[in-house]
Amino acid sequence: MAKWIKIAGGVVVIAAVGAGVWAWDSLNTGRSKVAGDSVTLAEFTSDDAEAIERGEYVMRMGDCAACHTREAGEFAGGYEIATPFGTLVSSNITPDAETGIGGMTEKDFFNALRQGIGQHGMLYPAMPYTAYAKFTDQDMHDLWAYMSTVEPVQNDIDENGGMPFPFNIRLAMAGWDMLFFDNEGFEPVASESDAWNRGKYIVDGGGHCAACHSPRNALGAEVASAYLQGGNIGDWYAPDLTPNPHVGLGGSSAEDIATYLKTGTDGVAVAAGPMAEAVEHSLQYLTDEDALAVGTYLTALPASDTPAPKAASLAETDMVRLADVYEVNCSACHGLDGEGIEGMVPAFSANHGLLGDPTNMIHAMLKGTRAAHTEAAQTAAGMPSFAWKMDDTQVADILTYVRNSFGNGAEAVSPEAVAEMREALDAREPLRAASN
């Protein structure tokens, strides 16, 4: 018995040591020692014009404004982020000393952005520190310089007030980090080109593309084995970014992707929903060289193994009937032949985005949507809601028709999926004829 007790004790000690090493790897803040730790943001305003300009570019790359700007002012927080565990609210990241990050030193700032350790405790990965961990020291110094020029706004935010117990316990995120956080900076791959490495740095770092475009497991961590192969983000779906020829970017060149990032359209697809926000607030500001680097990296990825979708089986009479419905309701913008309006309205012909998960199509039908407003594409076309006009079966039917016309072929959209989305979005019910 004594022998077994010694063995069990040894196992416990080894496990404890292993857990300690594991925790050290994920929670070690040694990378932040390059940052200053004596002056707070509220006390500091950079006079380095070049660093401030570079820092603004880093801010744009990281899409900070999109999530941290709402009614209270620029970077003052208040954006609600729905998660499977509750609702988070983006923080005030202005230099206000009382309600913003004005009390942070540069080292605190580094710890928050790259380590997920904020002034109120551990951060949730809805703030993509898991990606920002890739930021170089130089980019972080420059971003600090830019943030010192932001106008302070007093706006007190209860960031995790919408998270029920036990998910409102920030310390629990230390365990999450031990399991899923890669506490490493970006390492270029020597065998790849400068453009490929720059593209990967943007995609995996500031762009945090996998945060939306990779599926997540039950604990909210990205599934590494399905990197950039598409994922649900609340009431929208971020599609496959690999060169998959059926539902991904297969057929798109690096130049096509760069054009999409800068303008919100590649001539076929048009950004909508959260992607339109990303283009409007972030991606349009990429230099031409950086946008092309992203395209270079994405087109070099291995294609996902998602097979071609099976076409729905529709009776000829249904196709004829739905063609009339399409002509009356859709053709004015999307064209009789599904050609769309280049730069404004998505085409249905040769559009891979129609063939995978139908979430975005249902969302657009029920709530409407609009394209991104960019410097290169000033007219941000909008789509009205059809929730008032079509019931769940009618919405499902017209989407099934579009997904199986103009050279397309994809599974039918079910009325049940539309009904579920209508409820989730609190979309209105269709009008009914008054009874006599």
Image (cartoon, rainbow, N blue to C red):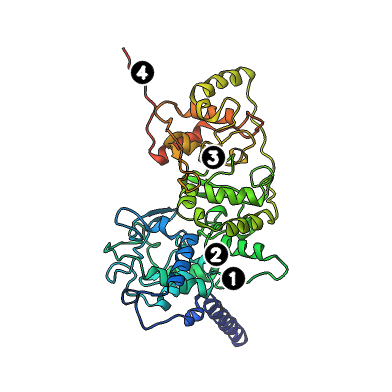
Q: Position of residue 166 (x, y in %)?
A: 39, 62
Query: Looking at the picture, which amino acid does disc 2 mark?
Result: Gly
Nearer mark to the viewer, of 2 and 4: 2
Q: CA distance from mark 3 to mark 1?
A: 35 Å
User: Along the polypeptide, which appears first: circle 2 or circle 4?
Assistant: 2
Q: Name which of mark 3 and mark 1 comes first in the sequence.
A: 1
In the image, residue 2 sits, relative to residue 278, either above or below, namely: below
In terms of depth relative to the viewer, which is nearer, 87 or 353?
A: 353
Q: Amino acid at mark 3?
A: Gly
> Few, some or many C-alpha atoms within 10 Å of disc 3 (few <14, some 14-19, many ≥20)?
many
Residue 205 is tagged as: 2
- The disc label shown at residue 186, or none: 1
Q: Nearer the viewer, residue 297 or 342?
A: 342
From where the camera sits, is residue 311 visible?
A: yes
Task: Indicate which disc, 3 or 4, sits on the residue closer to the N terminus.
Answer: 3
Compared across the picture, whether 160 is left or right of 303 comes to left
* Rendering coords of residue 107 (x, y %): 42, 78
Pair 3/2: label in front: 3
Q: Nearer the viewer, mark 4 or mark 1?
A: 1
Image mark for residue 343: 3
Dot 2 alpha-carbon crowd within 10 angstroms: few under 14, some 14 to 19, many 20 or more: many
Q: Residue at x 54, y 34 (%)?
A: 341
Tag shown at residue 433: 4
**Residue 236, image x and y in percent?**
49, 45
